[in-house]
Amino acid sequence: MTDRASTGAARARRYEDILVVTIDHPPVNALSAAVRADLAAAVRDAQADPQVRAIVLAGAGRNFIAGADIREFGKPPQPPALPDVCNQIEASAKPVVAVLHGAALGGGLEVALAAHYRIALPGARLGLPEVTLGLLPGAGGTQRAPRLMGAPAALDLMLSGKHLSADEALKAGLVDALAGESDALDAGLAYARQLLAMRAGPRRTRDAGAALADRPAALAAVDAAADRVAKTARGLFSPARIVEAVRAAIELPFDEGLRAERALFLQCLDSPQRAGLVHAFFAERETSKIPGLEQARPRRVERVGIVGGGTMGAGIAVSVLDAGLPVVMVEQDDAALERGRARVAQVYDLLAGKGRISADERAARLARFTGATGYDALADADLIVEAVYEDMDAKLAVFAQLDRVAKPGAVLATNTSYLDVDRIAAATRGPADVLGLHFFSPANVMKLLEVVVGSHTAPDTAATGFEFARRLRKIPVRAGVCDGFIGNRILATYRQAADMMMEDGASPYDIDAAVRAFGYPMGPYQMMDLAGGDIGWATRKRRAPTRDPALRYVQIADRLCERGWFGQKTGRGYYLYPDGARQGQPDPEVLAIVDAERARAGVSPRAFTQEEIQRRYLAAMINEAANVLREGVALRPSDIDVVAVSGYGFPRHRGGPLHYADSVGLPGILADLREYAKEDPAFWSPSPLLVELADAGRDFASLNRAA
Ligand code: 3H9
């Protein structure tokens, strides 16, 4: 029986004396204005209805509630506000039970914390992940969670953004019971009936005190968290505010604590970091929406072949094995195959050693791995990834073999990081079956996967690439064919800008420090030392005959490589790594080489401020990103942002280079480029797309909306 009309976002229905309010707002029951209004009205009406003795809150579909509606942030607020709805739920004179299944996250968990009782179904995931969006739990979460689970556990939950399983939530004190039933409605009704039978009334979290009874210990946990955040949060805005809100939960009466939380929440909501992180959230979900591929059906992939057992091949193998698929690895001889197998086993040994996977899981994953030294072993593979070294002739030879052995309809992928996928495809009789799958190292860890669609790649081949990425839990980004695709092409440009600054007077250490100060975990020279300078050197030597003499070429990296200084693995590169240290030390000999190169190039060095280094680095990045977009190599600005954030360490809270460009304003970026172009027009020439957008008063985001 339906008791009241609503917009349908939350339905109220009475089962004898229990009112069940079901939040039904696909896809994830986010707390939109309509949901909040319906929820508030249902709880209010229930107070006055003598036939209702208890209230059950549940979610329709796959989740309880995934949180506040992220799409509403930054827009004018619409009543009722979520904190008020939560307070109203808590104030109910009739007991309220929340039944959690699927996601009970952020504002969703806060609704549950305001309820008087919580039960969780198997598979429920509970969390307060607001920190990942630059926010803090702003509907009472910072005040109620510590009252239930204690300050240390609540701080850990909110600062990490992690999800807890139903079991973990029970142990932590966040829920009262695990439901035996698999149906939320049945479970909620059964629990509410029990409460009524026991004459259990409302039990308000605001009055729960035991978990915070030891005030000095709780405050010590807050101080410790404040120290930790100061050391590790690298310029992030919301973590320190989360800590302060929890301090308020301990020091202030409940209502004052709520007010403190609200003030801190609004600071976060207004911060550019919140805008950047929310942009990154939606951008990641947008990458798989490819115009023209909506109708394409991915091909079935049950068996995967991998050619090459080096670092990349082995990492890809682990990623595929982790997804539950069998792998056949092909290497050229037994010794190379054994090394490949050992690399795969080593990853699992490490994971098992750290307790991340059980011994059984390790064994099961390795059991799905087989190796061979002949291509015929790939005859029944549905998808084959070539991961041999970066050389066109080597790749062509592999594809000629794959063309011979692969079954009809098998998808053939190359893991090249910059070579021409169309040329590789042309080595086969079926270029429609060929695409690039550019994994990032370590391939079993890095989320980004560039799906390179060649001029002959069939739509269902491309769709298979995206579906494969989804199974591997990667973030796929569509890229067109060009030298370096999206990520490496842009990287080459801003590295060149860094090299030019180095030759003009900034030390590699100044440049790294400026890039870290912007929010990157490491600077470009630290990164090069980590990756190994030899690979880039080999590429530069190969490309030397075709290099455009009109473009400036900085030779400092070559001078280091000629000495065998390839970075961490050789104990020195731009930095010194004495006794295998991972943290490098500045090297006076490198500075002397840089000086000598400046003299050789006829440059009189000048000083660079940290701000100038950052501006040039970003202007180069944004300008090349605009070219990549203009040429259609990337589909939309937000795809480039995803590549930079998930593959190249661009600080997530700044959203990505093009979101960042919009936030500082395109006219300013263009003015910088024009200024720098006076010194070197060939390198700094502004992208026509950037000029067009800036002149029209538009931003990159307007292109996202159009894509
Ligand atoms: C908060 O709660 C603040 C409060 O403390 C204070 C307020 C005062 N809103 O991820 P999926 C969309 S902050 C709007 O692909 P899955 C998503 O964009 C919030 N939309 O599915 C996508 O749309 P589309 C704290 C949302 O099954 C679709 O739903 N909560 C929201 O892989 C499917 O999403 C969080 O941070 C939302 N809250 O994963 C949780 N969530 O189809 C954020 C999702 O158009 N959400 N969408 O592309 C998640 O972590 C995952 O979406 C979830 C499902 C695990 C729930």
Image (tube, grey):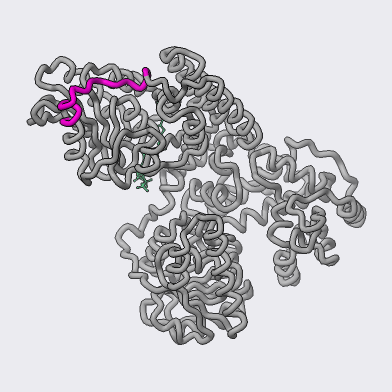
Pick the residue in front: 258 or 417: 258
Magenta stretch bounds: 193-207
| Quadrant position of residue 377 | bottom left
The front one of 331 and 599 is: 331
Question: What x and y, as percent, mark residue 429?
Answer: 44, 82
**Relative vertical location of residue 527 with respect to residue 48 in this rendering, above or below:** below
Which of the pair 80/108 is nearer the observer?
108
Q: Residue at x 33, y 24 (%)?
A: 114
Q: Residue at x 82, y 55 (%)?
A: 578
Relative to 101, say whether 202 is above or below: above
**Quarter of image, ligand 1:** top left
Task: Report the residue at 83% width, 61% height from top.
Answer: 560
Vertical placement of residue 34 versus 477, above or below: above
The percent position of residue 690, horizontal first and vertical second, equals 58, 44
Q: Name the image quarter holding the N terminus.
A: top left
Question: In terms of image quadrants, where is residue 184?
Answer: top left
Q: Is residue 74 among what the camera can see?
A: no
